[in-house]
Each structure stands twice: as structure tokens, then as C-alpha cells.
Image (tube, coloured by chain):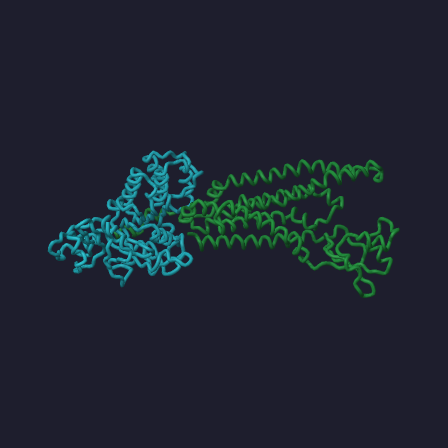
Chain colours: A green, B cyan
Amino acid sequence: MTALTLQARPEQDAALRPLPWRRMAWVTWRQHRFALAGVVVVLGGLAVYLWRTGLGIHQAWTFIVTCHPANSSVCGQAAGIFNTQYVPTEVTAGILLTLAPALLGAFVGAPVLARELETGTFRYAWTQGFGRWRWTLGKLVPLAVVVAAAAGILSVLSWWFFAPFFAAKFGTPLAPALFDLRGVAYAAWTLVAVAIGALAGVLIRRVVPAMAATLGVYLGLALLPGLWLRQYYLPAVHTTSNNIPGFAWILDQWYTKGGKFAFQGVQKSGTNASIEQHWCPNAPPSWSLGTCLSHHGYTQWTSYQPVTRFWPFQWIEASWLLVLSALLIAATVWLVRRRAA
Amino acid sequence: MNTKAIIETDGLGKRYGTTWALHECTLEIPAGHVAALVGPNGAGKTTLLNLAVGLAEPSAGSVSVLGGHPAGSPAALDGIAFVAQDTPLYKNLSVAEMLHLTRNLNRFFDQGQAKARLAELGIPLKRKAGKLSGGQQAQLALTLALARRPRLLVLDEPVAMLDPIARHDFMATVLTATAEDGVSVLLSSHVLAELERVADYLILMSRGRVQVVGEVDDLLASHLVLTGPAAEADRYTERPVVHVSRAEAQAHLLVRATADDPVPPGWEAHPVGLEELALGYLREPVAASVPGPARGRHAEPSEVSR
């Protein structure tokens, strides 16, 4: 019996099928189809919101653009209504679009490993022939890619939604709160959110705390680049001209006279009304603070990122987020291999 | 013989924080047995099983399976089926989906055999795994494991949560599989009564150490129970005493001796049963049989009054 038992079993070895990666596809689909349905609900709901409100915004904007004569009271009223009615909508849409990747990371990414570890089913899953690191990769990569792709599709809609606001010169496309709600950066942020969720799941090993941690960490991380990082993607442009190219992301502004700094308190874009009032009390409305002060011998310095850098910045942001996602998933797989029981 | 060992450990240890859940474990379980891993809670049984199936990494030493494959390696995963404590299943999957899942995750899966076994047990394929009774869940987990045609079946406390009938049925399935497929079995349990019937190899553990290892027949042949006057119990020194139990005037000594060894006058020798043997050792955690991994430790008789 002893000798027999460990001998090869020819009939079984011949029947050994290879274990291709696609075998995980059914497993992943069957176990995460409700999470994927949740993705459709979250992103689909958001898409419906953007589409329905976007139609009204586009209609209003088309009316303003085609309004003749432009300085009539009717046209002026239309512009006023646009500001009061749709700017809050834009803010709401921005908040919802910022929250969506965090929710996807929490509801799709976090439970993948946390649920297995919490319910003990990892003892089943990780002792099957497929092997646990392949199992982990075979689940995480397709889920992350599918969710990121869905977010990418939504970002096309958000591009259309925000178009009238940029056309109305409400802000620069590089503005911290808006830059990553459109383009490839949005898909990349969603990818990172799912990867954060997966890592939180394997570290915390409980579904609900892992979801909460994912929300917190993602929102914290999403805030950072706009405030401290994105402005350094490419060296800022400095100019002493008062004519700054349109839609530029102005990082800093300062004034000099005779080689010395002046108006230490005045920084960043925007006019300091009291200074302008003091130096140019009768200035025409078209004058900026810079124009006003240059009439008094001051030089205005501006450091800014031109709007032409929008796509280079998008790719730079998407690239490092992609690298970060790969590192997070690699760390997750490493932890799965290391610390199971 | 080494290459035929189903599990072989060398100085194996696992530490959680500062406590060693398993320490200095060196053993070799030959293939073709139903090996029972017995010990009180916290003895390190589950830790040893987790190390053997590759779920845990050793803190010290090494463990290899199926004749030299590292635990957790692809060959080891292919050849070992593990049913964990409380038989974890995906509660929201149906029985048929659990079959399909297991089939997708393994090189070999005998779908026909699995379905036939489930039909025999009266477990409906469409029922959700979470809606099955405890006994049915255990049978499903066992069926999934056996359909992979493993060379080694590892069961962690498979019957602890089951009622007596489910327990009996479960063990019957295990025994049938060992007879039909020649699968080796390693199971941990603290239900001693059940083992008498199934196990032919015994590993006794306590406090993270292995106390006794050996074939059941050999162990039973090398131990005796001596019954005699309680007053004279301490004077018996001819053979190592594992455990002394007293009942009023009488004392029962579990001793390492064979039927050929002399019996002192006034004493009677009885053969020992598996349960009695296991209990004797479990009551004396420092006692170790020879040969065993806990070398250098002598069986120090101590009294346990009852």
C-alpha cells in the first residue's frame, strides 16, 4: 500500500489539464458580479446625472453664445442665470465625480481579499491547485482594469459636461479640483482606488474596516497632487508680461521695483482690491492689478503652467498612478504569499 | 523510506509574536495511512496542518510533502486537498457552482464522481452552500476535496461541529475513499472515540510539541495498563510510567512495556486501547514516547487523582 500510494497515477497525470489564466475569469465573474453590478449602478447613476443636467447647461450656454446683441439686457440676464443656476451644479458634479473612485475602491477593491480572510474561505481558495498568488492576480487585475475602463468611459461624459464652464472661462482646466475629473487621469485614479482597496483588504482582513480605510486613504491621496505635486510636473513658466496666456494655471504672482520685492502681502492671482483702490482709484475695469501697478513703475512677475500642458500633465499623472497601482497590487500579492494563516 | 513520506518535517517551528505555536517538530508520516493528529486545544495541530498545506510559512525548520516537494509548491497544491476547520465554503454559491469553481481552480477534477457522491448523500445541486446543514456542508467540502483525487487528504477538525450521525457518515466517506483511491489521510481531532475506528497512525501533540508518533498497532503493542493496589503505585519502577490514575484503593498505571515484560506480584496487566493511550499521554504533557521528537525528556510519573 505504501509503495502504491505515492507512485504516479498514469491515468490521472494524463488527464491533468493545464491551468490557464482564463480559468480565473469565470471564478472572478461569478464571485464579483454583484460588485460589478454596483459599479454599473454608481457610474451609470452618475452618467445619467451628468447627461440630464449637462443637456440643460449646454442649452443655456448655446443660448448665451448665440445671443444677439451680446450687450443687451436679455443676454446679460442669461449669463447671470447661468452663473447662479449652474455653478452649484458644477460643484455638485465635481464632488460626485471625486467620490466615485473612492466608492469603487471601497466596494470593489476592498472586499476581494478582506471577505476571504474574514470568512475563512481563503483556506479553501488558497489550497486549490491554481495557487494563491495567481488566484490573487487573476482576480485583482481584471477587476481593476474593468473598473478603470468604466471610469474612463464616464470621463468622456464629464469632458462634455464641463466644456461650457471652461468655454465661459470659469477656470483653467488645470485647476486642482477639476484636472483629474477628466481624461486619462480619472481612469488612473480609479485604478489606484481599487488597488488601495485590495491592499487595505489584505492588511486589515475585515471587510467594513477595509472599506472605510480605502475611502479615507484614497480621498487623502487624491487631495495631495493638486495642492503640492502637480505644479512641479514641468518647470513653471515665469513672465513679467501683464498679458498672461488664457486658461493658464497661475501658481504665484509678485511685484518688484528697483530690484526689490514690493507688496509682500500680495501673492497669488487675483487682485488685492485695497491696493488697486489706493494706487489706481480711477482705473478702468479692464485693468488688472498688474496693469495698474506697472503704470507706477512696478514689475509684475507671474509663475504659471500654460494650459497647453493639459495633456502632458494628464499623461504624467496617469503614468505615476499606473506605477503606483502596479506597486500596490504587487505589495498585495506579496502579502498574500507571505502571511496567510 | 524518505521519498515515500507523505509529510516530513525537520525542526519545524511556527511563532506567533513571542509564543511558539509549534516548536522543534521533527516527524515523518509514511504514505498509506489514516494518520490522526490528536491533542488538546492550542496544542499546535492546526498550525502543523496549515504549514503542511502551505497556508503558513515556517518560522523555523522545514516541511516537505508528497515525497520531497516543498509545502505550498505547485506540485504540493496539486496533490493535497485540504478541508479546513468549520469547512469554509462560499455561502452564496450553489452546490453546482462550488463544483464548477473547484473544477476551474484545479488541474484534475472528477465531476462525475462528485455528482454521484452528492446524489448518494441527497445534497441538491441547486441549493446554496450556506443553506445546507452542517453535516451536508462538511460532506460537500469533503466531496470537493476527494474529486480532485488528491494523494493526501488533510482534514482539520472535520467532525468537531457535527452531530453523531453526521460524524459517522463523514468518517465513512473518508474510509471509503482511502480504500478505493488509496488516498493518504491526515486528520486532526479532539474527538478521541472516533479515532479508534479510523486511524492507524497516531501523532499526539501538546503545548506546541509532538509527544508520540507511530503506527497505532506498534504503540498499542508497546504499552500496557497495570492495575494494582494504590499504595504500591509509586514503587513500580521497572518500566517507564506514563501516567498514574487512582480510583479508591486501585491504581492504573499506563506503562511503556510489552506483554513479555514481567508483571510485579499483586498487579495485573491489560492491553491498552487507543483512547486510553491517548488520554494517558494527554494528561502528562511532558511525557514522550521513544522514539519521538521530544528527545531527552523522560516520562516523569506524576499523579492525577480522580
Q: Quadrant of residue B256?
A: bottom left
Residue B114: where, in percent of width, then height?
35, 39
- Please count the marks in the image: 0
- Answer left or right for A74 relative to B270: right
Q: Nearer the viewer, residue A291 or B230?
A: B230
Residue B255: where, in percent of width, then height?
19, 55
Q: Nearer the viewer, residue B118 or A108?
A: A108
Residue B305: where, in percent of width, then height?
24, 51
Residue found 33% across the figure and 38% down from its top: B117
- Answer left or right for A123 relative to A193: left
Q: In this rendering, is residue A104 above or below A242?
A: above
Q: Residue furthest bottom?
A: A259
Residue B195: where, in percent of width, then height?
26, 46
Residue found 87% across the figure and 57% down from its top: A295
Residue B4 showing in the rendered view: no
Q: Nearer the viewer, residue B188 or B265?
A: B265
- Answer left or right for B231 relative to A205: left
